[in-house]
C-alpha cells in the first residue's frame, strides 16, 4: 500500500480551528489524526465526518460540547484531513474504514461510554461500530446519514453526485462541500477544505468513497450492514435523529430512523432549519447545542434513577 501524508504546512492558519492534531497508529501502516476539545475526563462525544470533508467540519460544534463539560473527539477518516492517505482507490473498502476507525476509538483511545455522532459517511461507519461494539457506546446521534444495505434504491441526486465525482478530471473538494451547504463559504473556509489535498494523487479517498456505498443487495458490505440494522433496531441506547430540513441526499432516512431505532422512542428529534447536507457548516453551533442537551439530559435522567 502506497501511503501519502499531507505536509503540515498545508494546515497553517485554519479559521476557527485552533486544535492541535494528535495521531495514532491504526494498522496497515496507517496513522489517523484527531483533535479534541473539552475536559479530558468528560464523557466522550465522537464526531465522525463524511465525504469529502474532515474534522474541520465540526469546528463550530466542538466548542458547544466543551462548554457543556463534554470531551469532543473529532477524527479524520483515513484518506482525509491530516490522516494518512492510501494512494490507490482500491485500498479503500468499507470494511477497512470501519476497522481503521474502530482501532482508533476503541484500541488507541480506549473510549468507553461514548456518544457516537455520524454525518454522511461518518454515520455509515459510526453506526456499524455502535452495532458491533455496543458495550462501548452510551448514545448515538445520526445527522444527515443512513446505513444503506442496497435493498432500497439511492436517490437520483446521489447517483448524479457519484457520476460527477467519478468523471471529474480534477476533483474540486471545496466546491463539493459548498454544493452541500446553504450558506456561502468564505474563501478561507473553502481553502481549509482543499488543504488536505495538495494534488490529485492525494484524493483517492474522496474518489473511492461514493463507490463503496452499498447500492445493490449483493454488495460486499450489505450483509454486515443488515446485521447492524438488526442490532440497532433492538438496542436500548438513546438514539437521536438530528437532520437538517434541506438535505436531498439523506432526508428520506429521517422518518425511517426515527421509527425503526429502539432507542429513538420517546425522544424529541430536532429538525435543524435552514441547513443543507453539511449541517455542521450551516448550523454547527445549533447542532452542537442539540447534541450537548441530548447527552446531558440523558445523564440527568440516569442520575435521577
Image (cartoon, rainbow, N blue to C red):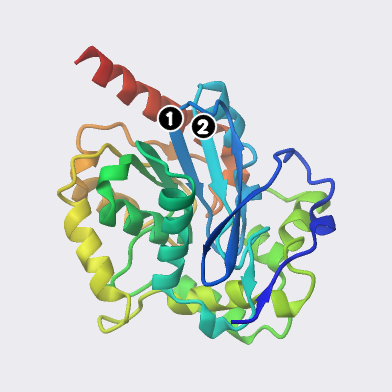
Residue 225, how many percent across, how many down?
28, 67
Q: CB atoms at circles 1 and 2 under 8 Å apart? A: yes
Q: Quadrant of the C terminus?
A: top left
Secondary structure under badge 1? loop
Position above or below: 117 against 81: above
Q: Is residue 151 visible?
A: no
Q: Nearer the viewer, residue 113 or 65?
A: 113
Residue 251, how many percent across, how many down?
40, 55
Residue 45, how many percent across, how many down?
46, 37
Pointer 1: what residue?
43
Q: Does residue 207 appear to the left or right of 266 in the view shown?
A: right
Q: Does residue 38 appear to the left or right of 100 in the view shown?
A: right
Which residue does the image show at 78% across and 75% down from the upper left?
Answer: 199
Res. 67 image quadrant: top right
Secondary structure under badge 2? strand
Which residue does the image show at 47% across and 63% down from the upper left?
Answer: 100
Position above or below: 25 against 204: above
User: Which circle marks residue 242 in the picture?
Assistant: none
CA separation in Å, label 1 and label 2 = 6 Å
Res. 163 image quadrant: bottom right
Q: Quadrant of the N terminus?
A: bottom right
Q: Does residue 10 appear to the left or right of 154 in the view shown?
A: right
Pointer 2: what residue?
71
Compare marks 1 and 2 and give the one earlier in the sequence. Answer: 1
Which residue does the image show at 28% across and 75% down from the upper left?
Answer: 222
* Mark 1 residue crowding within 10 angstroms, few (<14) / some (14–19) / many (20+): many
Query: Which residue is outermost to the top?
Result: 304
Position above or below: 147 against 269: below
Amino acid at each position: 500500500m502506497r501511503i501519502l501524508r499531507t505536509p503540515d504546512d498545508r494546515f497553517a492558519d485554519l479559521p476557527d480551528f485552533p486544535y492541535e492534531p494528535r495521531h495514532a497508529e491504526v494498522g496497515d501502516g496507517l496513522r489517523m489524526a484527531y483533535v479534541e476539545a473539552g475536559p479530558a475526563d468528560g464523557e466522550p462525544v465522537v464526531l465522525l465526518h463524511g465525504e469529502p470533508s474532515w474534522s474541520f467540519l465540526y469546528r463550530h460544534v466542538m466548542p458547544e460540547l466543551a462548554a457543556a463539560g463534554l470531551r469532543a473527539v473529532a477524527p479524520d477518516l483515513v484518506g482525509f484531513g491530516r490522516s494518512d492517505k492510501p494512494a490507490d482507490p482500491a485500498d479503500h473498502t468499507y470494511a477497512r474504514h470501519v476497522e481503521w476507525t474502530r482501532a482508533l476509538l476503541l484500541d488507541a483511545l480506549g473510549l468507553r461510554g461514548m456518544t457516537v455522532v455520524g454525518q454522511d459517511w461518518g454515520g455509515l461507519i459510526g453506526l456499524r461500530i455502535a452495532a458491533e461494539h455496543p458495550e462501548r457506546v452510551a448514545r448515538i446521534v445520526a445527522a444527515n446519514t443512513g446505513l444503506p444495505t442496497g435493498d432500497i434504491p439511492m436517490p437520483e441526486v446521489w447517483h448524479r453526485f457519484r457520476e460527477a465525482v467519478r468523471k471529474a478530471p480534477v476533483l474540486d473538494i471545496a466546491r463539493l462541500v459548498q454544493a452541500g451547504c446553504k450558506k456561502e463559504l468564505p474563501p478561507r473556509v473553502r481553502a481549509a477544505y482543499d488543504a488536505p489535498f495538495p494534488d490529485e494523487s492525494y484524493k483517492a479517498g474522496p474518489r473511492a468513497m461514493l463507490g463503496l456505498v452499498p447500492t445493490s443487495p449483493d454488495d460486499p458490505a450489505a450483509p454486515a450492514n443488515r446485521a447492524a440494522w438488526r442490532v440497532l433496531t433492538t438496542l436500548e441506547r438513546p438514539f437521536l435523529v438530528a437532520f437538517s430540513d434541506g438535505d436531498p441526499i439523506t432526508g428520506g432516512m429521517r422518518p425511517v430512523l426515527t421509527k425503526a431505532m429502539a432507542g429513538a422512542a420517546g425522544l424529541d428529534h430536532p429538525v435543524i432549519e435552514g441547513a443543507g447536507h453539511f449541517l455542521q457548516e450551516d448550523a454547527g453551533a445549533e447542532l452542537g447545542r442539540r447534541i450537548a442537551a441530548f447527552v446531558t439530559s440523558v445523564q440527568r435522567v440516569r442520575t435521577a434513577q
